Image (cartoon, rainbow, N blue to C red):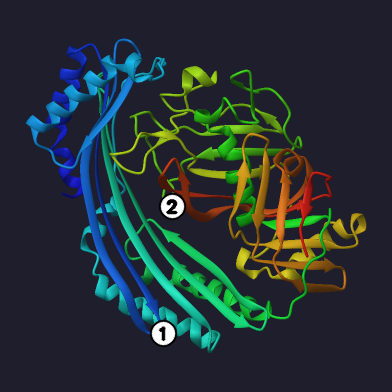
Amino acid sequence: MNFEDLDSVGGLGREVCRRGAARGAFVVWRAQSRKAWSASIREGRVERSSVGESSGHGVHVVGSDGYAALASRDDFREDRATGMLERAVAACQRGAELGLERIELPAVAAATAREVPADADSYLGIDLDAVCRRMRAIETRILGDVPGANLRLGFHAELDAWRVLRSDGTDVLFAMPRTTLTARVSAAGDDGTHGIGVAEHSPRADAPWDDALAGRFVRRAAQAARLAQALHGAPAHPAGVVPLVIDYALAKGLAHEAFGHASEADGFRTSVLARDGRFRCGERVGANHVSIVDEPVPGDHAWQPWSANGVRRERAVLVDGGVLREGLVDLWSAAGAGTRLTGAGRAESFRHAPAPRMSNIRIECRDALPAPGTFEDYGPHEVRDLLDGAGVFRRHPEVSFLSGYAGGQVNTTVGEFVFQCKAIWRLSRDRAVLHRPAIFSGSMFGALDSVREAFGPLRLDALGYCGKWGQSVPSSGGSHWFLVLDPHPDVRLGGR
């Protein structure tokens, strides 16, 4: 089954919704068709290549007593679909006995839409052998820049298509094409192995043949390879509270992990952003020139125009000028969270229950300072020149520049985060000294309060996958190219 076949199963979805409504239930019916192509390249050889696909449908039923149940099947036989519905309705009727929690659904308008990007058809013609040949050629280009580099390249493309019908007449169909090129470079030495990853995204299946994208990918992979080699012998950074510069990838980690998860409404009862079962909307949580925004961006790695509940995904301004304004809210959490429905429900597959999730999340700063050229033009010396020109060294003779995001974790109950970067440089007017990566940790409120300057336009292509409740969905975001954080007692850079 491919995404075009989702048109043909609409009659089945309408019948399931009709039967559910006749039983007094509110029904959300979801069908999904997903196909994925993957390959990895190392030392001129194809290590792995695969093509996979899955499809199926499910129902999310809310009975007249407010209890909900979920059921799914990986076939589209009508007799089995109606049987699936009956079992879900029966489970709702036993909700009190099963100890389920009642759901209060908000008023939501019915919608009809079809959003399929023009290039989606091109995914159905992917030639994985041709992709592997192209990726081997890209590997040769990287090795030409950094001979002897130890690297593994990856290609992943997928076309993820959904059709969502509801018993109120909603019928939306959308397809999300995404392609990523990845490189993992490493260098071994007496002090261990240093590894750095880079990635580029495109909504087009022919991304490896896009000269601009491939050129940027080669440049970033070569820079990562040289950095991995240079980290051997670099000193550890001393621990303490220091002025910081972070790039947009680490800023995305801060926005996503430290703040975004705390704003997801399914966790509002324990989130540091809530009090007495409601989000603390109207309270100050950061500097008055700092905002955090989440919204789907067309062509982005995490683009999703509609929720898995058939509600339009909206722009959510979580923090506006340092003040908490709203949360990421889906159909099931809206009533309890006490804030507007933003259509934030996402699910990995038709088998999963949707939950509030981020799409493209970013930190935006009012009156960001200019930065000429492109982001890839900026190494530590160029960042130092930006800081010097803005007078940052008059305020702080030495600033620690944290480059890249290498994972982390957050405790949303208390708002504390622990992140890892890829490298650190200590910058001053006359030098830039490389140090090994260290832990960047603290309070998300302290971090947002300490942001002072921002340089460059927004860059929103820091991408990854976000895991939650056993589900993984694409994520992306960023910030301005660089943010300056003044020293704050609740934000700390680790060390030995």
Q: Secondary structure at mark 1?
A: loop
Task: Specify the amino acid type for callout 1.
Answer: Glu
Tell me the residue at 25%/65% (across/down): 126
Tell me the residue at 57%/70% (across/down): 196
Q: How many marks?
A: 2
Distance between mark 2 and mark 1 Cα atoms: 28 Å
Residue 439: image quadrant is: bottom right
In this rendering, the label closer to the viewer, 2 or 1 = 1
Residue 455: image quadrant is: bottom right
Query: Crowding at label 2, few (<14), some or many (≥20) Cα neighbours within 10 Å?
Result: many
Task: Give the x, y percent position of residue 428.
Answer: 86, 67
Q: Secondary structure at mark 2?
A: loop
Task: Specify the amino acid type for callout 2.
Answer: His
Task: Give the x, y percent position of residue 206.
Answer: 33, 65
Tell me the residue at 29%/39% (across/down): 351
In the shown orientation, is residue 185 left or right of residue 81? right
Where, quadrant-wise, is the C terminus in this rendering?
bottom right
In the shown orientation, is residue 222 left or right of residue 304? right
Q: Earlier in the sequence, mark 2 or mark 1?
A: 1
Tell me the residue at 50%/72% (across/down): 184
Task: Give the x, y percent position of residue 78.
Answer: 9, 31
Task: Give the x, y percent position of residue 42.
Answer: 40, 80
Residue 238: image quadrant is: bottom right
Q: Relative to 105, does residue 269 appear above or below in the rendering?
A: below
Determine if residue 374 is in view: no
Circle 2 residue: 301
Q: Which mark is residue 43?
A: 1
In the shown orientation, is residue 194 left or right of residue 308? right
